[in-house]
Amino acid sequence: MHARFFPSPARQFAAWVLALAAMLLAGVPATAQPQGASDAGLIGSDRIAVELYVDAAAGAPQQGKEFLLALRFMPSAPEWHGYWTNPGDAGQGMRLSLDLPPDWEVGEARYPVPKRLLVSGLMNHIYEGPYTVLVPVTPGPSVNGADVGPIKASVDYLACTDQICVPQSARLIARSGGDFARWRAAIAPPLDARASFAITGKTLRVAIPFPASMALADPYVFVANERLVAYAAPQTFRRAGETLVAEIPLDAYGTGKAERLSGILAFGDGNGFRFEAGLGAVPSGGELVAGPQMAVATPPLWTLVLGALVGGLLLNIMPCVFPILSLKAIALARAGESEARARAEGIAYTAGVVIACLGLGALLLALRAAGEQVGWAFQLQEPGVVVALLVLAAAITANFAGLFELPAISVRLGGERTGAFATGLLAAFVATPCTGPFMAAALGAALLLPVPLALLLFACLGLGLALPFLLLGFVPPLRRMLPKPGAWMERFRRIMAVPMALTFLALLWLTVQIGGRPFGGIALVMVFGVLLGLFVVGKLQRGGKMAWPAFALVAAPFVAFAAIGLPSVYEVKAGEASASILAPRTFSAETLAEARASGKPVFVWFTADWCLTCKVNERVAIERESTRAAFAKAGVVPIVGDWTRRDEAITRFLDEHGAAGVPLYLWYAPGSRTPEQLPQVLTPELLATKASAGG
């Protein structure tokens, strides 16, 4: 039995320093033992006293026959509490030393089901009021024919309130008596079946046998292994038949490894049992029965399907789709060819969009199942993906400008179905950084639903995105509204190089924001090499010669240079949003809790540099002098979370509020327990009006 004082870095150490400072300010001695206390009976302090009892019903100690010792802890006032064997983020478990012959075996201490106490983001596993810890002892051969004498013990433990902690130490002599029957009943009983666990990604998954008919209120797994899990992180529970599956985020500073697992499963009203688990298979899926996602009501499936369809359709006019409007505009013009070709290309384009959305959705679900904290548009949080999109945008701009021809995605008159399919793939990949209206509920629910239903929603999103082109392929009157194909299409293609060039510049800015200026500079060198190679390809194509081997020879040195240089200059920055006239605080659970406790209105928004909808909303509604003045007058506390790079805390928070991605806008009125989720497209005066109305 051992002690642990705030073993995790930074915040746990800070909490321990604060506890020591409080002790010194209060003038509390390090060992609170009453003056003149003897080695018999009650020895402790005026905070939490402790007595040692031996079970008289067991009779005289006999070799190989287990008997129980009981440590009875009694706080002097309700505000004092003790700790479980694993105290959590802060505190100290009991440290017990028994004065016994060396051949006597002391078993693992048995505890009641502890309670949770969250203080300043630190989770404590505690006991309030009197509680008893039982310790099994099995005598060895030395008990035969020997005068054992009274059992003596020394125990170190910690007594705490919400503001102060006092180390305790006592020297005890066991005495007969005590209410062992009641104390046994209070101990968490052992599970009569073995559990299994697996560590998947950054999540501990535990499969615990649990009758499907048994009620489950407020479940929580108290993990005895120290430095394994994040104690304050939300736990998720699913029922899979007669098995309860718990998913617990790992401690970011821990080892992330365990050969065996033990703990207590609590399931409401002080009920629970202790379990042992070994490495093994853990069922996937199951019915969600508890966890942060339970706070988000899942709408009926038909509304989610409709939301995904309409949301995908509206993506065609959302700002985050503007960079690919050039591709779509030319595809619309090409649909004015023969009816058969128009239908074929409409189907091919739709197939590309739907497959891309399904692929992104499947990858997102797989990463989340592996324990990764990712959300919608996760691909744009990866520097390598952003650099690849930067090169792709440059290549498409060069293609539109006539620098070279790429038949696979040609936009010239008479293109093939493969070109429409490739354009659909590209359109969906670039068009999904942000969530538009109607999409939020559908994509948020997709992260909670079983995999087949989740993939259905992703497919509906793709179908909605491709719907205008599918209709053009199958509704002749719509096609007749388009200009007839002709030489104008080539001029139009050149004009469309301008928005693609603007897209390239936006991606270059994003590259610098994600990796720093040197990172952006090397990426630009690679882009130059690729464009130089494409220029050579264009020259050879116009001469009727084989072109693409030359491209490889020209571009390869630049790509190799970037492959070496980019990782070496990549700057890992903290997630900080761009400067704002609102002077917001940076999001964290602690910052939000402190702001809500202030009694003032709180506005929280989540953004990302790659989210064009976010940036439009910031320009239109957030970064306005009228908004700043209204916030200052009403005392609104602004908080911003930057999701440009992957941030597990923000991803968890988005999950808890049913959001698959950004933007997310929340308004906390003073004293309200739940926030109001604002629309994803903000009007200019919405925030000022909310502030003026007092929330």
Image: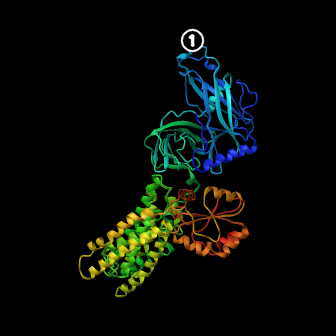
Where, by quadrant of the figure, is residue 407 drawn?
Answer: bottom left
Q: Secondary structure at mark 1?
A: loop
Considering the image in quadrants, where does the N terminus appear?
Answer: top right
Residue at the spot x=45%, y=57% of the render? 365
Q: Amino acid at mark 1?
A: Gly
Q: Is residue 148 above or below residue 80?
A: above
> Would you place residue 545 above or below residue 141 in this image?
below
Instruction: Name the residue: 44% across, 71% down.
Output: 521
- Residue 72 x, y percent position in the rendering: 67, 30
Q: Where does the image place residue 471, in percent across and percent down from the top left?
A: 41, 75
Q: With respect to residue 609, does 12 lie above or below?
A: above
Compared across the picture, whether 421 is left or right of 635 comes to: left
| Quarter of the image that includes the C terminus | bottom right
Left of 191 or right of it: where is 636? right
Q: Which residue is mark 1?
A: 145
Crowding around mark 1 (Cα neighbors within 10 Å: few <14, some 14 to 19, many 20+) is: few
Q: Position of residue 494 (x, y in %)?
A: 39, 84
Q: How many marks?
A: 1
x, y percentage for residue 538?
A: 30, 80
